[in-house]
Structures are given as C-alpha cells and as structure tokens.
Image (cartoon, rainbow, N blue to C red):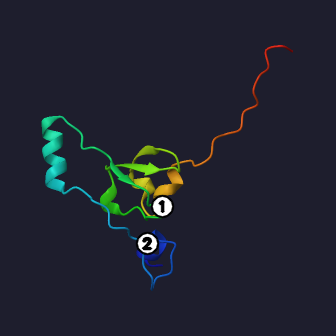
Amino acid sequence: MFATRALFARSVWKGPHIVPLPIPRAADVAAAASQGTRLPPIRTQARAATILPNFVGLRFAVHNGKSYVEVEITEDMVGRKLGEFVATRRRFVYKLSRNK
C-alpha cells in the first residue's frame, strides 16, 4: 500500500484537495515563539481543505456557517478535512418550563 493513498481518501490521479491558504513561514513561527507571542489563527471558510503535514501546530479559525471556531492542528488530524472538527449544527435541547 502506498503511503499517499492511505493519507488521502481521494482518487490518486486527482491528488488531495489543496486550497491555497496563507500559511506562515517556519521563521515567522519561530520568531513569534521566541518572543512569547502566538500568531493569530488563519481564518478560512474552506471546510473541504485537506489537512497537510505542514499544518501541524498551526491554528485555524474555520467558519461553521455563523462564526469562526478555532481549531489547533495535531498529527492525528493529518489527511482529514478542516470541516470535520467544527460542528455546524447545535444540539437540540428541550426548554424546561417553570410552571409545571
């Protein structure tokens, strides 16, 4: 089995669904870490974008249809989609009535 086939569930001849995102360079990340500050999250509405290995450690603000939800990328998320980690629907909860 090829490693790239296991990593990406899309057909091999198409390749992964890659969206051009403004990824900060490693030098920028290292400079921010040495100063003790964190880079702002990368805001995106591309929920279908495949998470690549160079995204590990970055923070993304993924749009859920109403607002942006922050997601920090770990090694376990590589090969999956950004939208899998942001819920788009709220859980239904019955309202409790006071006069019962």
Direction from residue 2 to residue 42 in the image, left or right: left
Residue beneath label 2, please?
Answer: 17
Between the residue at mark 2 and the residue at mark 1, the CA separation in whole angstroms equals 9 Å
Where does the C terminus fall, quadrant-wise? top right
Q: Is residue 100 above or below residue 33?
A: above
Q: As rendered, which of 80 and 40 lies closer to the eye?
A: 40
Could you classify mark 2 by the number of other residues whose Cα lies within 10 Å: few (under 14), some (14-19), or many (20 or more)?
some
Residue type at mark 2 is His
Q: Is residue 24 above or below residue 8?
A: above
Q: Secondary structure at mark 2?
A: loop
Residue at horizontal 13 percent and vertical 39 percent from the top:
34
Q: Secondary structure at mark 1?
A: loop
The answer to whether the residue labelled 2 contacts the one labelled 1, judged by CB atoms less than 8 Å apart, is: yes
Residue type at mark 1 is Lys
| Residue 5 x %, y % | 46, 76
Residue beneath label 1, please?
Answer: 81
Direction from residue 42 to residue 36 in the image, left or right: left
Judged from this view, the residue extending furthest toward the right is: 100
| Residue 8 x %, y % | 47, 71
